[in-house]
Image (spheres, rainbow, N blue to C red):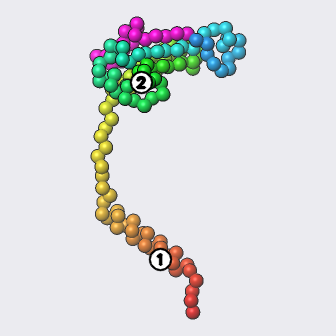
Amino acid sequence: MLKISNEVSIPDDEIQMRAIRAQGAGGQNVNKVSSAIHLRFDIRASSLPDLYKKRLLARNDDRISSRGVIVIKAQRFRSQEQNREDALNRLRELIKGAAIVPKKRRPTRQPLAAKKKRLNNKAKRGQLKFLRGKVDD
């Protein structure tokens, strides 16, 4: 059971994990041992609340396929157990992130004094550059 929050948790049978061989450097160990974890989680077929499902499916994330399956490949560590924990933690954080409602942006206006100050500085700078020009007799 993967606990997301106090109210939301995912049963283990909804998360598919498979051990695969890790890529990259590692010597003989990497050629013999399947230490990386390939995690798959189907959002649509899960027992998550509808709010979580909608937000996850609406996200523009490379880890979520067009069919609504989260795919996480964990190969950061040399041991399979650490990679399994890493994959589950990354899944937990992804789902937790979908629950957070982004703050609405309130449009603001530039104060009139700031606008006048900017225009005055601009005019002064222009005058300074004009005065650097050639002098006519």
Q: Residue furthest bottom?
A: 137
- Look at the picture and state if 32 lies above or below 58: above
Query: What x and y, as percent, mark residue 95?
Result: 38, 22
Query: What x and y, as percent, mark residue 67?
Result: 42, 21
- Secondary structure under tag 1 reads helix
Query: What x and y, as percent, mark residue 100?
Result: 33, 29
10 Å crowding of disc 2: few (<14), some (14-19), many (20+): some
**Residue holding disc 1:** 127
Task: Tell whether 110 sits left or right of 21.
Answer: left
- Secondary structure under tag 2 reads helix
**Residue holding disc 2:** 94
Q: Give the range drawn in magenta.
A: 1-19
Task: Kindly identify the residue that appears in the image at 37 percent across and 9 percent down.
Answer: 11
Task: Kindly identify the residue that appears in the image at 68 percent across and 11 percent down.
Answer: 31
In front: mark 2 or mark 1?
Answer: 2
Give the quadrant of residue 26.
Answer: top right
In this rendered view, identify the residue nearer to me: 99 or 66.
66
Whether residue 123 is visible: yes
Whether residue 82 is visible: no
> Does the magenta run of residues contain 17?
yes
Q: Residue furthest front?
A: 67
Task: Tell whether 88 sits left or right of 11.
Answer: right
10 Å crowding of disc 1: few (<14), some (14-19), many (20+): few
* Amino acid type, callout 2: Leu
Task: Kindly identify the residue that appears in the image at 39 percent across and 12 percent down.
Answer: 2
